[in-house]
Structure formats: structure tokens, C-alpha cells
């Protein structure tokens, strides 16, 4: 299992992912689930992945390989003219990988994966998509300003209650850390370290990925502070008449 979030703001888009991959309680590994492509000044894109590790790595490898020899592998994620077409290329690649694996006689369900893809290509606005294993996708909007994949239920309530499109990147990171902390505490299959990336609208370049380790002082402050705040809020609520 995993947990990834893509969050649209007035200022841009924030991406965060965990790195835990496990095949049982005694087999826990760390893999990067955030993948990036950019041509500074022309396009900047981020892909978050959840699901079968072999499937997601195959998709990323294929997308990356196609960028190496444009003439032989058009279209590529670095050559399509719009974010919609880039999302369609990612979705088609995901569907093809799943179909290829399932053609060996195993169930397609065992190879499923879901992805969040976002960014901006020059000439168009920043966009964010949720890509399904069937190869279709939906786009974020004012009504649905963020997407989650993986283990979503534990971290969703705080996003619904505290999200504000006008919030700063700093506030967005604080919000996402609370969401991830709640998920990590509730599900052992989601774990540190975390990767976070900010995209500033119309900058057409990605900020460096920041990796947040389990002993990160700010993360520990957020984790402890949120727990204390919840306890304080609970204690302040009136008792029922029983």
C-alpha cells in the first residue's frame, strides 16, 4: 500500500508521497513513488504512483525510455503539446502495461495501479489528473481540488476540513503532513520517508524534491502538536447528559 496526494492551489500544485512498499510484515522496502520530467521554461510534470510495483515501474521506465530517442518513439511525454495529451499518454501506457502482464494468464486485478499526474506545459494552465488502471482519467476542478491514491481514508478528513485554495505552500505542506501523519499512525503499510514537490504556476520548472525523514524536526513537531491539539479539542467539548 502507499499514500500519495496532489493538491491544487491558487499559487500552484503540491505533490506528496510516501515511500514504503511491502509484501508482508517481514518484507518492507523503500521505493520512490514520485517521478518528474521537465524542460525548464517549456514544461514541468510530476507523476505519483500507487499499486503494483512492477506495473508502476514498467510505466515509468517506458515513459522515460521514450524520451531518449524522440524520432523513433514519438509521441513522448516531452513532446506532446498539452497536459491533456500527456495525461492520455500516461494513461495509455498504464493500460497497455496491465494488459501485457495479464495476457500471461494471471488476473489483471493483480497488476492494477493508479496514478496522479500534474504540471504545466507552456501555452496552457497547470492541470492535475487522476489516472485509473483502465486507462481513463479525470481532471481536478474547483469542486474536486485534490486527488489521493493508495490508503486514502485516514488522511482525507483533515484535507476536507482545512483545505483552502488560497493557502500558501507552507500551509499546504503543514496540511499534508498532518494528513500523512494520520495515515501512517493508522496503517503500517504507509511509512516514512516522505517526498514533497512544489510547482509554482507559470514557472515551468520544478522545485527540488524535499525528502522528509522520520526524525525530521519539523515533522515531529507537527505530529506531536497535532496529537496534543486533538486531545485538547476533545477535552474542550461538552459532555453528554447521561
Image (cartoon, rainbow, N blue to C red):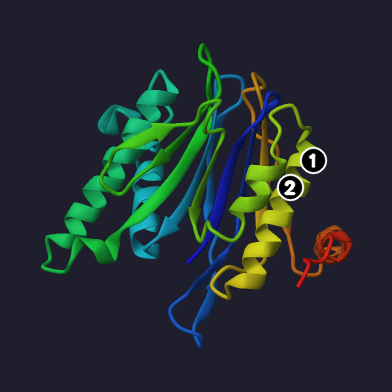
Quarter of the image where one finds residue 40: top right
The furthest residue to the top: 123
Is the Cβ of the residue at disc 1 closer than 8 Å to that at disc 2? yes
- Looking at this view, is 138 or 55 the one in front? 138
Q: Left or right of 25: which side holds 99? A: left
Q: Quadrant of the C terminus?
A: bottom right
Q: Which residue is mark 2?
A: 175
Residue extending furthest toward the bottom: 26
What's the residue at 47%, 38% (across, down)?
117
Number of residue marks: 2
Residue 123 pos. (x, y %): 51, 11
Along the line of sight, the residue nearer the viewer: 231 or 23: 231
Q: Picture coordinates of residue 239 (x, y %)?
A: 82, 66
Disc 1/disc 2 C-alpha distance (Å): 6 Å
Residue 69 shows up from this direction? no
Along the horizontal axis of the image, is 94 left or right of 168?
left
Local SS, label 2: helix
In which image quadrant can residue 179 be found? Answer: bottom right
Q: Residues within 10 Å of mark 1 (few under 14, many from 20)?
A: some
Q: Is residue 137 left or right of residue 104?
A: right
Q: Which residue is mark 1?
A: 171
Asked if residue 134 is positioned above or below residue 78 in the image, the reply reads: below
Q: Position of residue 170 (x, y in %)?
A: 81, 40
Judged from this view, the residue extending furthest toward the front is 242
Residue drawn at point x = 57 percent, y = 68 percent: 190
Q: Residue at x 57, y 47 (%)?
A: 5
- The answer to whether 183 is drawn above or below residue 26 in the figure is above
Question: Please, what secondary structure does the residue beneath circle 1 have?
Answer: helix
Amino acid at each position: 500500500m502507499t499514500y500519495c496526494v496532489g493538491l491544487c492551489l491558487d499559487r500552484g500544485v503540491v505533490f506528496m508521497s510516501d515511500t514504503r512498499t511491502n509484501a508482508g510484515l517481514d518484507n518492507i522496502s523503500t521505493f520512490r513513488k514520485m517521478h518528474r520530467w521537465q524542460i525548464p521554461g517549456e514544461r514541468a510534470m510530476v507523476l505519483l504512483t500507487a499499486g503494483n510495483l512492477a506495473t508502476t515501474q514498467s510505466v515509468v521506465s517506458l515513459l522515460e525510455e521514450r524520451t531518449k530517442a524522440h524520432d523513433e518513439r514519438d509521441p513522448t511525454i516531452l513532446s506532446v503539446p498539452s497536459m491533456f495529451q500527456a495525461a492520455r499518454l500516461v494513461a495509455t501506457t498504464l493500460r497497455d502495461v496491465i494488459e501485457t502482464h495479464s495476457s500471461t494468464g494471471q488476473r489483471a486485478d493483480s497488476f492494477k495501479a493508479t496514478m496522479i499526474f500534474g504540471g504545466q506545459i507552456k501555452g496552457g494552465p497547470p492541470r492535475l489528473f487522476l489516472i485509473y488502471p483502465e486507462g481513463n482519467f479525470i481532471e481536478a476542478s474547483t469542486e474536486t481540488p485534490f486527488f489521493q491514491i493508495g490508503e486514502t481514508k485516514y488522511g482525507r478528513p483533515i484535507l476536507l476540513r482545512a483545505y483552502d485554495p488560497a493557502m500558501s505552500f507552507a500551509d499546504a505542506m503543514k496540511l499534508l503532513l498532518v494528513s500523512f501523519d494520520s495515515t501512517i499512525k493508522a496503517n503500517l503499510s504507509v511509512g516514512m520517508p516522505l517526498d514533497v514537490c512544489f510547482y509554482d504556476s507559470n514557472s515551468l520548472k520544478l522545485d527540488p524534491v524535499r525528502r522528509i525523514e522520520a526524525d525530521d524536526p519539523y515533522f515531529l513537531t507537527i505530529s506531536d502538536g497535532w496529537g496534543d491539539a486533538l486531545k485538547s479539542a476533545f477535552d474542550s467539548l461538552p459532555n453528554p447528559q447521561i
